[in-house]
Amino acid sequence: MANKKAEPKALSDEEVLSNIAKEVQDAVGFSQDAIANKQDRGLEFYNRELFDSDRAKDGKPDPLKGRSKYVSPDVAERVDWLTAQQLRVLDSQTKVVEFTTKNDEDIPLAQQMTTVVNAIVRNLNSHATMLTPWMKNGNITGLGVVHVGFHQDKGWRPPETIKGIPEEQLAEYVTEDEKDDGDLKILNRVGEPYPAPLPPEAVQQGLTPEMLTQMGVQLPMLRDLKIRRRKNTWQMAIKNIKPEDFFVSKDADFDQQTGGIKADLQGHKCVVDRAALLEMGHKKEKVDLIERSDGDDTGIAQERAKQVGFTLGRQNKDKVDLYEVYTRMDIDGDGWREYVHLTIAGDIEHSGVLLNVEEVSEYFPYAAYCPFPLPNTLFGHGVADKIGDDQRLISNIMRANIDGLNASVNPQKVVNMQAIPNFDDLLNPHPGKIIRSDGDPSAAVSFLNTPYNGAASMQFIEAIKQNIDYTTGVGGSMMAVSGADFQSTSSAFLSQRSNSMQLLIELSIRFFADTGYRYMFRVIVDLLRNNPEGAEALIKRLTNNFVPISVDNWNPDMDMNTTVAFGIMNRDYNQAMYEKMLGLQQQAVAAQSPLATEQNIYNTVVAMLENAGFKNSSAFVNDPSKAPPQPKQDKPSAEELQAQAFQAETQRKAAADKAKNDLKLLDLYMEDDRIRDKNEADTDLKAAEIAGKYAVQVDLAHIESQQAAQRDTLQRGFAQIAAMQPKPQQQPAPQMPQMPPQQ
């Protein structure tokens, strides 16, 4: 008998929890490990906390009692400068990331994906509010992470009272209220039923409700209802994750193909109300098993708590720990590890409760940012990792200078107790105070003067700060130029030095655009494709386009380009190049050359506006590709065609008649010339005959002038006759298009 193939056995909740608990415990960020300690130190440097050696420990006295406790703000300055520079570049770009394709048929799809996702990132979510903590967490601790979630908010709107509901419509409200998943809930019925008001026609006729009742006409009864409507809004939320709440397996690295996080396990922890879990749709019997949260006692969490003024520990409210875990696991036992999303609440190490198991795509919803990455690992350096020791050194030098200055300004005093009978008179000095003395007052008190020698150390501090600027790419020497530099250095050299200093910032932005920022776009496309119903509702709300947009063909694997390139921070140079390019494009368009089009000119102008810091380019120029199409000319009707044919026939006949009349006029001209030539010849012959016979001269000039006058009169008559002839109508010549002005 052949062995039957064993049926696959799905994992139970206990087996899933047992398998995942060990992996989460070993993950980076779950416990106080080396990375967590590094992040804790980074936040302490940013907050200018005292160093470990400055704190009193084990009951010992304060080691800095009576001395300066100054902490230099070098880390805070560089973090804020770096964040501002990065935000300026990323937020001024209309499209930091866009989808591209080599297939012509996919170009409209790529443009659609780019438009929708940019609207989600910039309009649905506050772009600057999302980017600032993301980059600042990375600049302080070395790693900033955001989570992208797509969910439907199924809350309830505030109560409202609807007046004048007829009985038949009331039944519809009651039916909707009885549904478990209905969009309406009846809170109560306000007052008693009342008759509907009289129609305007009845009022005009002077009828009353009593008269209508006598006539057998019953007015409908109305009710007032107090209801609550459901709020079904789809949200694409981009949420910053606290560094101490994010955990990932130790093999984590940046994925060179997608830009996301490449790791066996990744997830985050949060604290939520127990009631919120019920609102999410989780089963009540499971929610009741979850232990209450004890709070977060990690170092970085305590450091953050000190700044906002609250204490950690068990909360008074009924809050629980919630873990969102993404990994690969063979849930159904078929031998293939699926990409799964596990929702676990409570103490995940000992008594966790598995609330939900969901199969997802390979695009886990976490996008990371690291300002100074290290090869082959997700965890790079933050600003504090690079200059924390320098901040400590500068702080110690500044403390010594402050202590020396205090000793010089307020020196130690030696008191002659025999000259001052009451020592209390020397305490708490103030102007005009009386000090009792016995003997010579000048011998009562003497000062131990301490010279101030800290001037040389200030130059050493400046050298350290300049080295910090070179290390981070931001700082005082990067932000401003001294007067001595202007006097001894050419403008070209200053520009070259500025561009070189900005390379580190541009490198950080370029890496961020190609990793976390680009991967965030992939996650959004993947979430929309996997939730087509919510995608349609969200896209309608964002684009105000009620034509359904199908996301079935959307592909998160499509090629993507980033608009952030080296040299993007050199705004003066970029503006000059844009102006030259604009001039060349305008000349090409004016000459009708295929080298440039109006769309190229528009793209150049938009780039100039973005370079100048203007975000809304549509307020200044219009996109030629979005111009409304020219109205199509309607085909002429049969009546119009008949009229055009009749007009053409009339013009043809008029032209033929004019040709006949012109021929007749030509005949008249020729006949007139022939008769005149004959008359002139006869006149000359007659004049010669008279002169030979009678020896008398005939005045031929007078006779010729009279004949010419008669000829002119006849020609004017012919011209008048020709002007009276009908002329054929000419079609208007096509107008040449206006050429754009040359620059």
Image (spheres, rainbow, N blue to C red):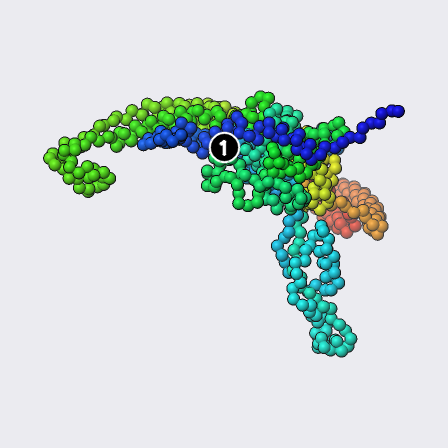
What residue do we see at 54% from left, 33% from top?
244
What residue is shown with label 1?
A: 299
Image quadrant occupied by the N terminus: top right
Frontmost residue, 567 versus 532: 532
Frontmost residue, 91 versus 125: 125
**Residue at the outermost right position:** 1
- Quarter residue 271 falls in: top right
Frontmost residue, 733 versus 262: 262
Residue kind at label 1, given as amino acid type: Gly
What residue do we see at 68% from left, 58% from top?
186
Q: Residues within 10 Å of mark 1 (few under 14, many from 20)?
A: some
- Quarter residue 558 falls in: top right
Task: Please tell me whether residue 382 is drawn above or below residue 314 in the rendered image.
Answer: above
What residue do we see at 70% from left, 70% from top?
195
Frontmost residue, 7 versus 458: 7
488 with respect to 211 (left or right): left
Image quadrant occupied by the C terminus: top right
- Quarter residue 399 falls in: top left
Residue 269 is situated, as x and y percent measured from the top left of the image, at 59, 36
Q: Secondary structure at mark 1?
A: helix
Residue 363 is situated, as x and y percent measured from the top left of the image, at 67, 32
**Residue at the outermost top position:** 375
Does residue 198 appear anywhere in the picture?
A: yes
Residue 80 is situated, as x and y percent measured from the top left of the image, at 48, 33
Residue 233 is situated, as x and y percent measured from the top left of the image, at 66, 47
450 with respect to 242 (left or right): left
Q: How many marks?
A: 1
Does residue 717 appear anywhere in the picture?
A: no
What residue do we see at 66% from left, 42% from top?
286
